[in-house]
Image (spheres, rainbow, N blue to C red):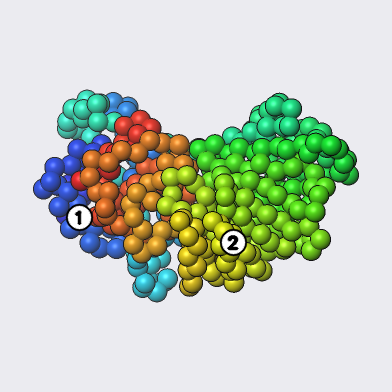
Amino acid sequence: MEKERFVYLIRQHSLHLLSSAEKAELKDWLADAANREAFVDLVTPRMMEDPDRMEYQDVLWQPVLDVVLRQDRSLSGEGEQELSSVVTDRRPAILRRARWFVAAAILFAVAGIYLLLNRRSQPAANVPKTSLVQDVPAPAQARAVITLADGRQVVLDSSGAGTLALQGGMHIIKQANGQIAYSGEAVRTAKTAYNTLTVPRGSRVVQLGLADGTKVWLNSGSSLRYPAAFTGNQRVVDVTGEAYFEIARDPASPFIVRKDSLDVQVLGTHFNINAYSDEKGVRVTLLEGGVKVMAAGAGRVLQPGQQALVNHNIQVLTGIDTSGVMAWKNGLFQFGDATDITAVMRQLSRWYDVEVEYEGGATRHIGGTISRNVNISRVLAMLEMTDAVHFRVEGKKVIVLP
């Protein structure tokens, strides 16, 4: 492909203006793994800027520099994996590095050629502005709120480190790293003081340390209702959405995680519960220890690596990829080899707080691993590279195309 043609197709792709023939042409070019990886590094938020003031070096130079720097870091052991396995390339690492450097060199040359052409030829105003889209960044803050027993609310992202409130003899402390912890001596009262931590859509994951030493991580679009201090012979909390628990062991006081009529009983263990209302059932995945899942008068005990799918009954699944279950806590989207696209989009919708509509493609499946710390445009570009799905973005609405 001529370099000028490559530049044109990349630009048209970023503006969602490719014709059917141009899509096929770009798809053929992307058959090469080096081209695919270079393509992803080009499709960045800079491609969404106003073309009247956009020079191509603003689109190309920084992504190419990022590629080179990322390879330098990987060679020195300091690299951070950003995007992987949506594009499956199993060749040796040294060949992948060499391919990256070749791609970077080509892109520098392309940038220079385009800049000359851009100054001599068509004005940028020829690109329809109505096709531009607004990119959506990954959440930058924990936009969470703690609702106290008396109805007062503490907004975490606007609160500094230190004691936020006093409840039942327990100090609610925001630590320097943003984690929330309860510390102090519990005061027995006639009425237990319950707090609720709410993590809305579009918020980063929040870590909470309960009064008994239990640690909880809450995903976006989730909430946890819990006592400020545990004073009875049971420790009971209520969850919505998704949470990962590391339970402090106390044989005299079992820990119970409740979602409506479902109970997960534990003594000391690590497990994940996915209880979003728009998912098909509640999933309890055990990583360490043991739990008993009870619902509708029935109970099943899980072993590490097993998952309980609770809908009308309790189904125990084995051979679970726990790394995929825990990807959200580790800063990743990770989809199985045949994840329903609607399940993928539900995760994106919660994390980026976007609306999703379907004009088609709702029955398609996709797999791969993508960082949760990149703008949504980058995630969508990676998903489109599978050719299983395509998108149109309108502000904070993502439309899945036929």
Q: Quadrant of residue 303?
A: bottom right
Can residue 358 be seen from the camera position used here?
Answer: yes
Inspect the image, locate mark 1, and give the three-letter code of the amino acid beneath it: Lys
Q: Secondary structure at mark 1?
A: helix
Q: Residue at x 71, y 37 (%)?
A: 195
Circle 2 residue:
293
**In front of the other: label 2 or label 1?**
2
Can residue 106 be seen from the camera position used here?
Answer: no
**Mark-to-mark CA distance, 2 and 1:** 48 Å
Specify few, some or many for label 2: CA neighbours under 10 Å numbering under 14, 14-19, or 20 or more.
many
**Sequence order check: which comes first, mark 2 or mark 1?**
1
Q: Is residue 5 above or below residue 125?
A: below
Specify few, some or many for label 1: CA neighbours under 10 Å numbering under 14, 14-19, or 20 or more.
some
Mark number for residue 27? 1
Q: Position of residue 179 (x, y in %)?
A: 70, 44
Q: Is residue 161 left or right of residue 306?
A: right
Front-most of residues 204 and 302: 302
Q: Residue at x 50, y 37 (%)?
A: 202
Q: Position of residue 298 (x, y in %)?
A: 56, 62
Q: Position of residue 103 (x, y in %)?
A: 32, 58
